[in-house]
Image (cartoon, grey):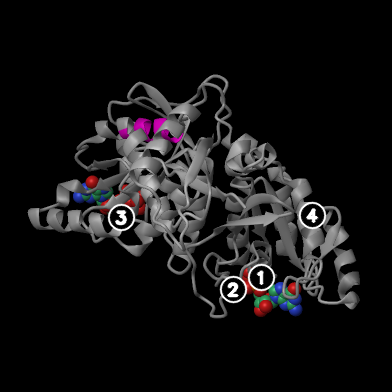
Amino acid sequence: AAEEGFDLEEVEGAIDEAGHGPLPVLAVVGRPNVGKSTLVNRIIGRREAVVEDKPGVTRDRVTYEAEWAGRRFKVVDTGGWEQDVLGIDASVAAQAEYAIEASDAVVFVVDSTVGATDTDEAVVKLLRRAGKPVVLCANKVDGQSGEADATALWSLGLGEPHPVSSLHGRGTGDLLDAVLEALPEAPAQRFGTAIGGPRRIALIGRPNVGKSSLLNKVANEDRVVVNELAGTTRDPVDELIELGGITWKFIDTAGIRRRVHLQEGADYYASLRTAAAVEKAEVAVVLIDAGESISVQDQRIITMAVEAGRALVIAYNKWDKLDEERRYYLEREIETELAQIAWAPRVNVSAVTGRHMEKLVPAIETALASWETRIPTGRLNAFLGEIVASHPHPVRGGKQPRILFGTQAGTKPPRFVLFASGFLEHGYRRFVERRLREEFGFEGTPIHISVRVRE
Ligand code: GDP
Ligand code: GDP
C-alpha cells in the first residue's frame, strides 16, 4: 500500500469507515408541533423538505442518515403523523411505539413553552416500558429567558432536559453529544444474528398487494406454524414460520394481519411501519401487485429496503389475474421502472392459488447468501487488475485515474473500498459495480463501493 501512495493508517481508516456494520438508529418522538421535524432537519444538517407548512401533507420518507462528531447513525422522524388520524393520544402513542421498537435510543421532544402535557406524560410511560435510553429535548428555548421553562421539565423524570432551539440551532450540539453517549456503537440487540437464531424477513409492500394473503398462505398451508422455539425471545408482533424445513421470523406480522384501515395519514403510518420492519429484518420481500402498474409507492418501498442495506427479493403477486397483454406491459415496466434493482431475485406468485410459493424460500436464501458474501482480497485484486487492464478509465485533463487496489471492508451488505490514483467518474464506478456483479454474483443484495483518492 505504501508504495502506491497511501499510508497504512489512511488505508485502515478508510476500511474501518467503509466497513461499518448496520448503523444504530435514533428515533425522534413527541407530540405534533413540538418541533420534531425541525430538529431532524438540524440533525441531518440539510434543509430537506422535512418540514411541511401545509397540514395534511404526508411523507413517505421517515429514515435519514446523520453524522455527528465522526459517528454515523440513522434518524427516524415521526413528525409526519397527522394528529387527527387516530386522535392525538392514540396517534402519538402508536407513532412512538413503532419508532421506539425500531430504535436504539430516543430523543423525546417537548415544547418547553407549553410545558409537559398529559400526552407527554403518556409517552414517558411508553418510553419507560421500552427501556431504551432517552435524551430529553426541551425545545423552543430560543433564548436565555426560556431556560427556566426547560428546567421545569425535570418533572418528567427522564433526567436532564436539554434546552434546545431547533429553529435556530441553539443547544443542538450539546443535545447531540448526549445522543452519542446514549446511542450504542452498533444496533446490537435488534440486529445481531443470534447464533442459530431464525433469519428475519420483512414482508412489505403497499396496501392491498396481498401481504396478509401471502402470510396466511405460507403460514397455514401444509406448513407448520412454530409457536415456540427454545432459546428465542418471542416478540408478539413477529411470527416464527417454518418454510422449506427452515424456521424464519416474519417481522411485524401483527401489523400485516391487523389491516389497519385509515383514511388520511394511512400512507405515512404504513411508511413508518415499513421502515421499522425493514430495520429489524435481514431480508425484505417486497410484494408488488402484478395486475397493476408499478407505482411510485412501490419504488419508494423498494428504495427503503435498498437504502437500509437489506437483502431483497421481489415477489410479483396476483399472477393468477394476468392476461397476455398485462404480462407484456409488466415486463416493459419492470425494465424501465425497476432497472436499478435488476439484481434482485424475482418470483411470480399468487397468494390465492399458491402458484410458485415454493420458489420464495430459494430466492430468499440466495439473497441472504449474497448479502453475506466475502470476496477474498487476492481474488478481488486480481479481478480489479483485469478491469484496469482491459477497461482503463478515460483520460481526463491529460491524466488517467487508475484503481490501485481494493478490499472488501464489510458484509451484510458487501461493502468495498477502492483506492485510486485520481477521481473516478460516476460512469466508471457504475461500470465497476456492474462487472463486480457479473463476476461475483451478488444476486439479491445491494453493494456499496466507496473510493479513496490519493492526495
Ligand atoms: P413536529 O410536528 O413535531 O414535527 O413539529 P415541526 O418541526 O413541524 O414544528 C412545528 C412548528 O414549531 C413549526 O412552525 C416550527 O417552525 C416551530 N418550531 C420548531 N422548533 C422551534 C424552536 O426551536 N423555536 C421556535 N420558536 N419554533 C420552533
Ligand atoms: P395487504 O393489504 O397487502 O395485506 O393485502 P391483502 O392480503 O389483504 O389482499 C388484498 C386483496 O387482494 C384481497 O382482496 C385479496 O383477496 C386479494 N389478493 C391477494 N393476493 C391475491 C392473489 O394472488 N390473487 C388475487 N386474484 N387476489 C389476491
Q: Where is residue 270 in the image (x, y as percent from the top left)?
A: 46, 57
* Label 3, label 1: how far apart the Cα atoms are: 33 Å
Can residue 42 be seen by looking at this rendering? yes
Q: How far apart are marks 2 and 3 (CA)?
A: 29 Å
Residue 13: percent from left, percent from top: 66, 41
Q: Which of marks 3 and 4 is nearer the N terminus?
A: 4
Figure quadrant, ligand 1: bottom right
The x, y position of residue 118, in whole percent, is 74, 63
| Residue receiving disc 4 | 177
Does mark 2's beta carbon lie closer than 8 Å to ligand 1? Answer: yes
Q: Residue 370 carries which label?
A: none
Residue 378 or 356: which is nearer the viewer? 378
Numbered disc 3: secondary structure: loop
Q: Nearer the viewer, residue 355 or 119?
A: 355
Ligand 1 neighbours mark 1 (CB distance < 8 Å): yes
The residue that disc 1 covers is: 38
Left or right of residue 398, residue 351 in this image: left
State the residue at coordinates (30%, 52%): 288
How far separated are the C-alphas under marks 4 and 1? 18 Å
| Residue that sits furthest to the top in the current view | 230
- N-terminal of the two: label 3 or label 1? 1
